[in-house]
Each structure stands twice: as C-alpha cells, then as structure tokens.
Image (cartoon, helix red, strand yellow):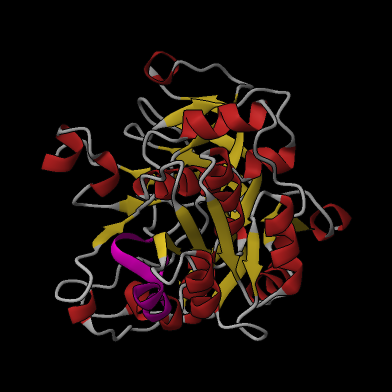
Amino acid sequence: MYQSRSMTAIVCHGPKDYRVEAVGKPEPRRRELVLKIDACGICASDCKCWSGAAMFWGGQNPYVKPPVIPGHEFFGRVEEIGEEAAEHFGVEVGDRVIAEQIVPCDKCRYCRSGQYWMCEVHNIFGFQRQVADGGMAEYMRIPETARLHKIPEEISLEDAAIIEPLSCAIHTVNRGDIQLDDVVVIAGAGPLGLFMTQVAHLKTPKKLVVVDLVPERLALAKSFGADVVINPREEDPIEVVRGLTDGYGCDVYIETTGVPAGVTQGLEMVRKLGRFVEFSVFGAETTADWSIIGDRKELDIRGAHLGPYCYPIAIDLLQRGLVTSKGIVTHHYGLKDWTTAIDKAYGLDSIKVLLRPGYGADAAG
C-alpha cells in the first residue's frame, strides 16, 4: 500500500497505545483517490476505542485491526487520482470532498439491496489497517467502494468537519419519526445530541427536551431550539417530562449518552406505544427490565447507525445556515498534539475536538 514517501499520522497499536509516527504516504490504486486531510474530528467512539472498550477489542477476533490510522470524521481535498478514479467518483484534483465513514463491500445482501450502511463486512475508516486507514494523518486513501460527496467552498472548515456526525444525527432523528404533536426527549448534549437538537428543532415537535449534566451544554441546547433543558443533578428528568405530558411520558426518546443510565431512564420516561431510538456506542453492558418494552408499554425500539443517505442533507443544511458547528467545535490541535487532544476530547470541558495536520505544534515543528 505504501511507498517511500513519508507523512505524519496517528497510529493505533492497541488500547491507550496511540503514537505519532512517520509512515508511508498512501498511493492511489485503480479507482482510488488520495486526500490531503484538512481536519478530522475525535468522536466519542474514538475515545472509547482508545480506552479499550470491549466492543472494539473484545473476543477472539477484535473489530479493530492494528496498527491502524484512526479517524472517521475527516474531510479534505483530492490530492491524487488513480486510474479511472476521476470518472468513478466524479471529481478532480483540488476538489473539497468527504467520504462516508463506512467502506462497503458492495457484495453482501445489505450492500446489494441499497442498505450499504449495514454492510456485513462492515469496515469503518479508522479501525481496519490498510483496508480502511482513517483521517488522523496528513493524507489518506479513499478506496473504490467509498461513498464520496463534494463540499461547497462556502462552508467553513468547522462546519465541513462536522458533516459526518451531523449525518448521523439526521439519520437518528429520522428514525424517531417525529410528528408535530410529539414531545421529544434527547438524552445527552454532546456533539451528537446537540446536532440532533438542531435537526429535531427543524421538525417542529410540540415540545423538545434535552437532558444533560453539563450546564454549558444545556445552554447551547437551549440556543439550538430546545424548549426545556434538564440537569439531572438539579431535577428529576422523569418527573419533569411527566409534568409536561399529563403524566403519560414522552412520545419519542433519543438515547445518545452512551451510559447505561440513559437507557433505563428512557424506558421509564417514554409513554406506552412510544418510540425509543438508540444511537450510542457503549463502553459497558446495560441491564434493563425488558418486560417494560413488551408487556407494559409495547414500545418501538429503533436502532440508529451511521448516516446513510444523509450526507447531502447535512451539506445542504449547513450551506443554508439551518445547522451550525458554532459552540460545538471547541478545540483545534495538530497531529503532534495527539496526547493533549485525546485527553481534552475525553473530558467534559470540550465538546468537539478537531485534529488539523499542519496546525499548532505541527507547524511549529
């Protein structure tokens, strides 16, 4: 895959063993591209992978295949074009583009039926070496089966950098099938929850409620259209929501905390015949009373994974100014500042942390 040309990259060798290294710059093969990376966000799943969560590292055949360059929230410009790639992707050198986070096999039953985001092979950029090395590097290779989208020049760097999580947020909100008379609760006001708040607000539900422990994030949620914000340290979210709904509970509950309490809270908070949408990546198993789902409430439990068919929507919403990264993108670091960046991303005094090749310590070096 790599020739003698060198670049700087973050390389994952195992849990909490991520190193800044000089590696070979990728070469495009037939129907492939090489991007020069402008920015790559650090996702909550990146943090959980870094920390050693079992869903990434457990079992006989762990999902992560190190050594691998992490990062799936990237965008950049077309640097090099392999044979037939210009026609295949419809791009030219210099185009500003983003690839969806999944690298579909295009052969399994899901890919062949258009449900590519549930590809049976399921390679995601940043988790499988060479097959899907990610964007925490100066350059990255885009394989033939990637789903590529152009980014208009007028979209800011920060907005372009959040197209991936925004696409996930759009898909999740759509899974909730929000109606005009619904009371909607979004549990968690991290980057995804704040994007979901903005998207759900565009659906104009009867009442939009956001639950989080961080006052600054709740203030942002309020500015993005939340009607009610709840800090569980100060109020009982279940009682507040019951008070808003004549005691019935919310119509739609979207779980994006990634902690078990977010699940059990939601099962109790949602009304009978309500819709529970699960998005999060969990670092620990969750135990719940499943009789709530069937015998007591007959709930619709809906998963939400990735951002299928939502990248063009995300780009359009950003271009029209209906959704924003302002207040959400909080920190920028160069690749050489990886240790500081992951510590910051793992803490609560940041929201979205970006890695930018050539920024800060990179440029100083």
Viewer-proximal residue among 212 and 55: 212
Q: Position of residue 349 (x, y in %)?
A: 75, 73
- What count of labels does the image hold? 0
> Which residue is nearer to you in this view: 349 or 70?
349
Which residue is at the front of the view, 162 or 27? 162
188, above or below 101, in the image: below
Horizontally, residue 336 falls left or right of residue 35, namely right
Looking at the image, is 15 positioned above or below residue 186?
below
Residue at 58 percent of width and 44 percent of height: 201
Quarter occupied by residue 233: bottom right
Going 68% across and 77% down the picture, which residue do you hit?
Answer: 347
Whether 281 is among the magenta residues is yes
Q: Residue at x 69, y 63 (%)?
A: 351
Q: Is residue 192 left or right of residue 354?
A: left
User: Residue 102, position in %: x, y?
Assistant: 37, 46
Residue 278 position in % (x across, y down): 36, 63
* Range drawn in magenta: 263-283
Residue 207 location, x and y as percent? Answer: 55, 53
Does the image show residue 307? yes
Q: Is residue 204 magenta?
A: no
Task: Looking at this view, name the residue that lies furthest to the right.
Answer: 364
